[in-house]
Every structure is written in C-alpha cells, then in structure tokens.
Image (cartoon, rainbow, N blue to C red):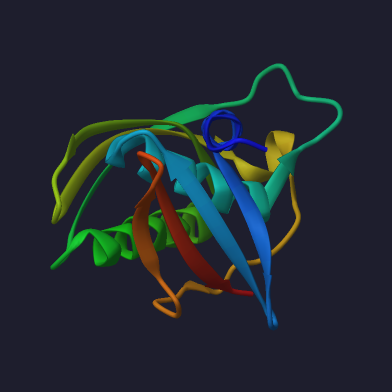
Amino acid sequence: MTKKSKMARTLRKSHELFEHTADIGLRAFGKDSSELFVNAARGMFSIIACPKKRQPRDIQERSFSVEVSAANREELLVSWLSELLRLSDIHNIIFFPFHLEQLTECSLKARLSAHELNAGYKRKTEIKAVTYHNLNIKTLNNILQAEVIFDV
C-alpha cells in the first residue's frame, strides 16, 4: 500500500479502537484539531452506546454548552472527553452532533446536542475514566492522530 493510499484510508476513518490490557484504547484522526477532538468524542460514545434497531420517533434533544481548559493540547483532550463523560453519566445522555465554537491549544468551547441514552440507544460499555496513560497527539502524513486509553 502506498503512502498516499494509506493517508486517504485514514482520512475516511474518524477513529478506531485498539487492544489494551483491561482497558480500551481509542485512536482518533483529523485533518485539524477541531476534527480530531470531535472524532475522539464520537469514538468514545461509540464505545458507550449504539443505536437501537427501532428508533423511537419522539426522541427529545437537549442542548449543552461545554467549556474546558488545560495546560496543553493533550491535557485539553482528556479534559474534553472527561467533561463529556461526566455529563453523560449524570444526565444519562449521549452527545452528537458536536459543534466546536472555539478551540485553542489550551481551551475549548462547544455547543452539543444531547440524546437520552435509554430512548434510542443501548448501553454497550461503561467507561469509568479517561486516562493519561500513553496519551499522545501527533502528526503523521499531515493527519493528526490522538491515542487515549479509557478505564472500563
């Protein structure tokens, strides 16, 4: 496989899971930081729940605003995912779509749509925490890639 075709394949894929002892690893991809952070959140919620076969017609949607800050981009990713996980657990919801209003190296503001977890989604896995273990964000072939481990 050529370098160009590998890059094209990676761009089509927003995230992938990888094996990690007793935990779950997520590798997210993006052409920029905004896409990377959104794809990491999508990946996390794909671990937590999946759509039920029969979707109710009257699913209530709620709106949330989220603001997080951190010392650097890696810590910001953990803060972002941890805040989404916290809100998801408290309100029994999952988030999508994600609209990042502002993203810098150290801060993020987003407006999110939330959906009741029990209404149209089936819980798959409980994530206890987003960890710093082997956390990294790097650029490969002009594509950003983040790896994060979830404690399950």
Q: Residue 128's spot in the image, x, y percent?
A: 56, 74
- Quarter holding the C terminus? bottom right
What residue do we see at 52% from left, 60% from top?
A: 89
What residue do we see at 41% from left, 42% from top?
A: 141
Question: Of all residues shown, which one is farthest toward the front?
Answer: 2
What residue do we see at 26% from left, 67% from top?
A: 75
Q: Viewer-proximal residue, 76 or 129?
A: 76
Q: Residue 92, can we see it? A: no
- Quarter holding the N terminus? top right
Q: Residue 129's spot in the image, x, y percent?
A: 49, 73
Residue 120, quarter of the rendered image: top right
The count of marks equals 0
Residue 3, quarter of the rendered image: top right
- 11 lies left or right of 66: right
Q: Residue 150's spot in the image, x, y percent?
A: 55, 70
Q: Residue 122, can we see it? A: yes
Q: Viewer-proximal residue, 137 or 89?
A: 137
What residue do we see at 66% from left, 19% from top?
A: 58
Vertical placement of residue 4 versus 38, above or below: above
Q: Viewer-proximal residue, 119 or 95?
A: 95
Question: Of all residues shown, which one is farthest toward the right?
Answer: 53
Q: Residue 95's spot in the image, x, y percent?
A: 49, 40
